[in-house]
Structures are given as structure tokens and as C-alpha cells.
Image (cartoon, rainbow, N blue to C red):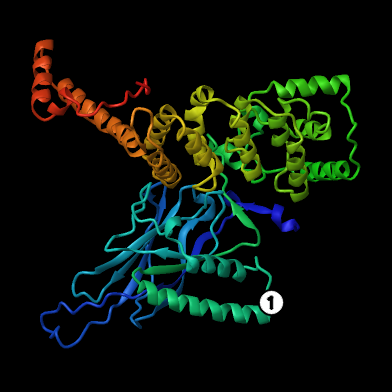
Amino acid sequence: MTGNDFRFFLSSDINLPVTFRVDRLEGTLSSTKSSDSGIDSTTEDRRPELYVECALYIDGAPFGLPTRTRLESMGPSYYWNELITLSTKYRDLTAHAQLALTVWDVSCGRDEGLVGGATVLLFNSKMQLKTGKLKLRLWPGKEADGSLPTATPGKVPRNERGELERLEKLVNNYEWGQIQRVDWLDRLTFKAMERIKELESCKNGNSYLYLVVDFCSFEHRVVFQVVPVCKSQANFLLPAPIASTNELVTVWDPEVGKINPSEHKQLKLARSLTRGIIDRDLKPSSNEQKSIQRILKYPPTRTLSGDEKQLLWKFRFSLTSEKRALTKFLRSVEWSDVQEAKQALELMGRWVMIDVCDALELLSPVFESEEVRAYAVRVLQRADDEELQCYLLQLVEALRFERSEKSRLSQFLVERSSRNIELASFLRWYVTVELGEPVLTKHFYSTHEILEKRVKKLAPTEYGEDGSILWQSLVCQTELVAQLGTITREVGAVRGSTQKKIEKLRQLLSSLLSELTYFEEPVRSLLAQVF
């Protein structure tokens, strides 16, 4: 860590005009024929002549006059390498200031042809001024939109970024000295990057156009800050003290919300000494015991402070007989420390068995360790079917926090449900509802698929129902709910007296939904599964 990490400029203190460099256009520009009637368009393609129009927008409104680059016609590679200086200064920018860049083609005849446009914010999500080279994706046939939110974002969506975008970001960091230079390794790396770039170009066929823009850099990072607006001209020339005006001044501190390095280092040293001198017989004093009991009564949603975590870690061996203390102790573990995590897992194995309700907390998103989540599943195995059904909805919700699609929790739920058709019905309904979540569909679809396979393999019951018949009875529940939903919407749409609604219901049951009046096979009830 160097001293430069804690130094920064405030944007309100920079009395310099906004400056950036329009570098080049990447990608294949679609060739078009000349539209001039006096020229034979079938014999010769026209050569595009491009320029870039740069406009600044403040909070969605244009600010100042747009600036244009020179014409460039040396295709297919278009290099401007032109420095653009706007009339606006950095101190005048707001947090939502953005640059709208539009590429025009003047070789289309009388009217200028629109190639594409892109918009980029000047400050990132951390309220720091963007620096270095940025590769903006152009929106074909669209002029850059400076409104908020913009319709032409130049930033490539995260789900579409590939290896090439990752390497370009590293190159940008390398050029600004954020990555150490090693000459012999750099030469090999850049050669490999060129090969990767050629392969990506061949694979994608340069389907997109990119405009490369180079933003200027400062000695230190630039952080956005609002300039306090004074009410009078006299105050503008000589600001009054804050105490006399009773006004609050917002100061941007980039260290707010981050871990205090001094406290973090002290905690690491304390735990390191504790690991070196392990006193398994260490007992808390009366005051420390009261503090521990107070911590154990905290709800699961409360975050432990650093001192509380240190207290639980210090007396971890004496707390192994207290089943309520395990979840709090695991919250005090620094899981990024390999040695500490290993010792915590060993101690968890010797802890007195916790209650089933406490095991639900270990399946929350706070605990990412596979060993901890597996321990929670082992505790749940002690619960009978009636108790498990009470927690089933929460357990299905916990599937979204599992790393693997075929997790131990998923296997446990399917295993128990395959023994009890009532649990299987509830599990199937809970999982089916979660299939509507587009982000985590794979987790729940995998559980639904495993449950279907296990139920279909069940042996025939005393009533002669094999696994396939049982599963089909569960599927019929979905069809029945869909039909009842249709009836509810159709009858609800009828305006008038109750008699008209009854007539509509009879009409539906005698025509489209006549199968509801007679069931060839009984449908298992959604609430009372056993019949």
C-alpha cells in the first residue's frame, strides 16, 4: 500500500477544461454505394468520410455547443487521434455528466449519413472521474442520446463481455502504471493478445463498431464533489463560516464504509496470538459471561461488532457445550483466513448438536462454506416429516444460496420427499413457483427434475399406485389450478347480479371445462394430500 492510495483531487477544485482524445474506430464499416445520380453506382463503391460529433450533457440537458473532429477517409481503419477540448470545466460537472459521441458520414451526398452513436458517463459508480482508454460500442443508425437514462449506452453489458474486453481493461491499467512492467514478459503477452484479438475478430466477424476514446489522467484520482452555492455575491467572494450560516456542507470521503486497516490488523494479530497460545481451559469472567449471554440473545439478522466477535473467538472452547452459541461463533470466524477457518470447522464437529431451527440460520446467505451448510443438513435429518414440513418453504428458499445445482440440501429434500407423498407435493409446488425466477432457474429446475425421477421410481403402494401414477396425480394438481384460475377470471369479468355469474359458471362447466364435472382419476387435494 502506497501513499498515493489515500490522495485524491476534488472535481470542484479543478479549474481546467474537460479534455479527451478521440482515437479511432474499430470494426468493419458496412460499405454502401454512392447515391449521386450522376455517378454510376454499379461500378464503384464510395469511400466513407467520417467525423465524430462530441456533445456534453449535464443531468440529461445539453451543455454548451457540440464539437466536431476533422474528416477521416483513410479507411478501412479510421484514425483521428485528435484532442478535443470543451468549453466546460471539470468543476462545473455534475455526478451525471455524460458525453454523447455520434459518428457521421458526409459521403452520402447532400444529406449526412448517420453511422451510430454512444454515450458515456464521465464519473463511474464510485464517483471517480474516468481515465484512460474506453472502448464504446456504437448503436448503428442511432444518434447519441444524452437523456437520463440514456438509450445509447456505450458500455458493453456485463453478460456480453468476453476475454477480449478483460484484456483491454488490463492493458489500460498497464499503460497508466497500475501493473508492474516486465519487458520480456510484456512482449510475450502482447503477442498472445494479438493472436486472441485475431481469433475473436474471425469468430465474431466484427459485427459491432467501437469508438475508442482516451480520457486524460491526473496525478491522483479525481473524486466528485458539489460546490456549495452561496446566496449572495458577497458570500460568493468571501464565504461565511459554517457556524454562522447554519448550513451543512457535504464532503465526499472515499474511505467511508471500508474496513479500518488499523483495526483489522489489530484483530488479526490478536487472533494470531490466540492461535499460538491456545488455552482450552480459559473461562469467561462474570462480566464476560453476561456479555456472551447478551450476544446469544441477538436475533439472526443482527451484525456482530468486532469486539463481540473477538469475545466469542476467545472463549470458543468453553462455549462448545452451549448449543445456542454455535451460529454466533461461526459468524465471528474470518473465513478468508485458511487456518482460522480450518480450526473453526474442527471445533464445529465437537460442538453439542444444535436445534433444527438454528440449522436454518446456517443455510442463510451469510454462510457460504460448504462444510457449514452440510452440517446444517445433517442436523435437519433428525427432524421428522411433520416438523420438516413446517420449515419446507424456508428450506426451498435456501436453495437459491447454494453454489451447486445438485447441493446436499437439494438431495436431502428430494430424499425425504420421496418417502412421503405429502412432502413431495408441497416440495413440488414450492419449487414450481420458484421456476419463475429467471436468475436462479437452474437451481430449482435441477431439484424439480431430480424429484420427478425419484418419485417415478417408487414401488407400488398398497393401493396399487406406482411412482408414475403418483407423479401424474401431482401434475394434475397444476392443471386443476390453471382451470380454476380460468373460471375465476371469466366469472369475475361478468358484470351484473349473482345469477348472471352463476349462469356463466354453468356455461363454462358445460362447454370448455366440462371435464371438471367428472374426474376419470381422483385428483390429490392440494392441502390434504392423503386420501
Q: Is residue 479 visible?
A: yes
**Residue 30: x %, y % from top left:** 27, 75
Q: Quadrant of residue 463?
A: top left
Q: Amino acid at mark 1?
A: Val
Quadrant location of the N terminus in the rendered image: bottom right
Task: Please name the residue shown 50% across and 37% down the image.
Answer: 415
Q: Nearer the viewer, residue 204 or 401?
A: 401
Which residue position is annotated with label 1?
182
Task: Please name the residue shown 70% across and 36% down the image.
Answer: 330
* Left or right, 430 with reference to 304: left
- Please determine whether, in this image, residue 73 is positioned above or below residue 360: below
**Residue 247: x %, y % from top left:** 60, 30
Task: Please name the residue shown 34% across and 82% down the image.
Answer: 75
Query: In the structure shown, which secondary structural element does the residue marked by tag 1 occupy?
Result: loop
**Residue 390: x %, y % from top left:** 50, 23
Q: Nearer the viewer, residue 269 or 84?
A: 269
* Left or right, 85 with reference to 179: left
**Residue 148: x %, y % from top left:** 38, 46
Quadrant location of the C terminus in the rendered image: top left
